[in-house]
Image: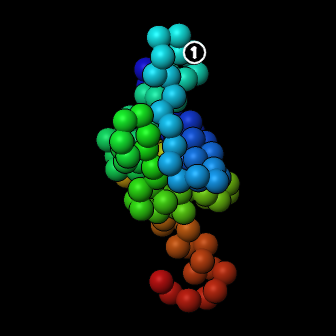
Amino acid sequence: MRRDEEHIRKLLLEYESEDDWLLLMPGTTTDATPDELKERYHILLMMDAGLLAIVGSGAFRITNSGHDYLEAIRDDGIWKKTLAVVAETGGNATLELIKTLALGLLKAKIEQHTGLKL
């Protein structure tokens, strides 16, 4: 299965919108759906990247790094520009590179809006 950056963004935004900070791992039963298995795989990838952390058996939470990643990619315009730049340069990028690029675009947007050099 390939990593899907759009799916990761969607999942993080969904998890952040939950009322509870403690989230349950999907796809742990033998009759897990393909969507549950895809979500589980991407959760494991986000854990590898430090965006999510295990909290007990079958539960996880968003880390501070995960919230920082969300802040970098939250804005739809910045997200689209980030993906466009990645596509223009061959379409390959790590999650860390995507975050760095999105932060750069966010910084430029704030500088343009405020006139302050960050």
Work out whether residue 73 or residue 68 is closer to the camera in this orientation and state it. 68
Residue 99 seen from this side: no
**Which quadrant is home to the N terminus?**
top left
> Image check: 72 left or right of 17?
left
Residue that sits furthest to the left in the current view: 48
Q: Position of residue 117 (x, y in %)?
A: 50, 87
Q: For the point 57% across and 41% down, which residue is it?
A: 11
Circle 1 Cα neighbour tier, 10 Å, few/some/many (<14 / 14–19 / ≥20): few
Residue kind at label 1, given as amino acid type: Thr
Residue labelled with disc 1: 33
Q: For the point 50% across and 22% down, which residue is it?
A: 27
Image coloring type: rainbow
Work out whether residue 16 or residue 8 is closer to the camera in this orientation and state it. 16
Work out whether residue 23 or residue 33 is closer to the camera in this orientation and state it. 23
> Image check: 77 left or right of 52?
right
Q: For the point 61% across and 42% down, which residue is it?
A: 10
Residue that sits furthest to the bottom in the current view: 116
Q: Position of residue 94 (x, y in %)?
A: 37, 44
Question: Quarter-wise, where is residue 36 in the image?
Answer: top right
Q: For the point 36% across and 42% down, which residue is it?
A: 56
Q: Position of residue 2 (x, y in %)?
A: 44, 25
Question: Quarter-wise, where is residue 93 in the image?
Answer: top left
Residue 14 seen from this side: yes
Q: What is the tally of numbered marks visible in this picture?
A: 1
> Image check: 83 left or right of 75?
left
Q: Position of residue 57 (x, y in %)?
A: 37, 36
Work out whether residue 37 or residue 117 is closer to the camera in this orientation and state it. 37
